[in-house]
Image (cartoon, helix red, strand yellow):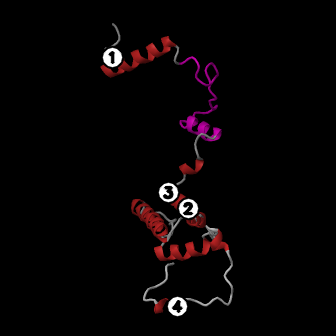
Amino acid sequence: MGRPPMDRDVARVESAIEAAARRGDFDDLPGAGKPLDLPDTHDPDWWVNQRIASGDIDSSALLPVVVLLRKEYERRDETLAVLPDEKAVREYAADYTERVHEDRRANPFQRMLAPAWDGDDAVARWHRVRPRRAPETPEDARPVPESAPRRRWWRFGRRPQS
């Protein structure tokens, strides 16, 4: 007896592979003609471990979400330092806290928790860690004398711009 008939999709893929091999599309692949570096014992994840060892995959991506969230929280000062304004800080804190709550809902019995983050706390911390901006124009760089009279905003009917 012969082989059972191939599924149409499988036959189409097989013929495409055979045509590519005849054209030489697979001739210059990296590692061609080299033996696979297989472990001595059976490891179903040998290829993932090999990719991690070669640096193709960031091993931190394999950590549980709660660990990644806690690491993000520990590095929050670095993130805050590059945010341009309070609105962006509040949006970041809200996004982070939503991801924390999603993880808690998905894993209600986990022992390790990532801290939630209040937007007001994030803004207060942003004010402490943000870099001092250099003046943008030479006029702004000129030092203001100590004895310069202060302008009173209530005399002009409007608050000063911050």
Mark 2 Cα within 10 Å, few/some/many (few <14, many 20+)?
Answer: some
Regarding mark 2 in the picture, which secondary structure is present there? helix
Q: Give the answer, above or below, for where 147 lies relative to 118.
A: below
Amino acid type shown at disc 4: Arg
Question: What are the residue bounds of the magenta stretch?
Answer: 26-54
**Precedes in sequence: disc 3 or disc 2:** 3
Label of residue 14 in the image: none
Q: Earlier in the sequence, mark 1 or mark 3?
A: 1
Query: Which residue in the structure is indicated by mark 1?
Result: 6
Q: Residues within 10 Å of mark 3 (few under 14, many from 20)?
A: some
Q: For marks 1 and 3, give the CA distance.
A: 43 Å
- The residue to which callout 2 is attached is 72
At x 53%, y 14%, the residue is 24
Q: Which residue is mark 4?
A: 152
Kind of residue at badge 3:
Val
Q: Secondary structure at mark 1?
A: loop
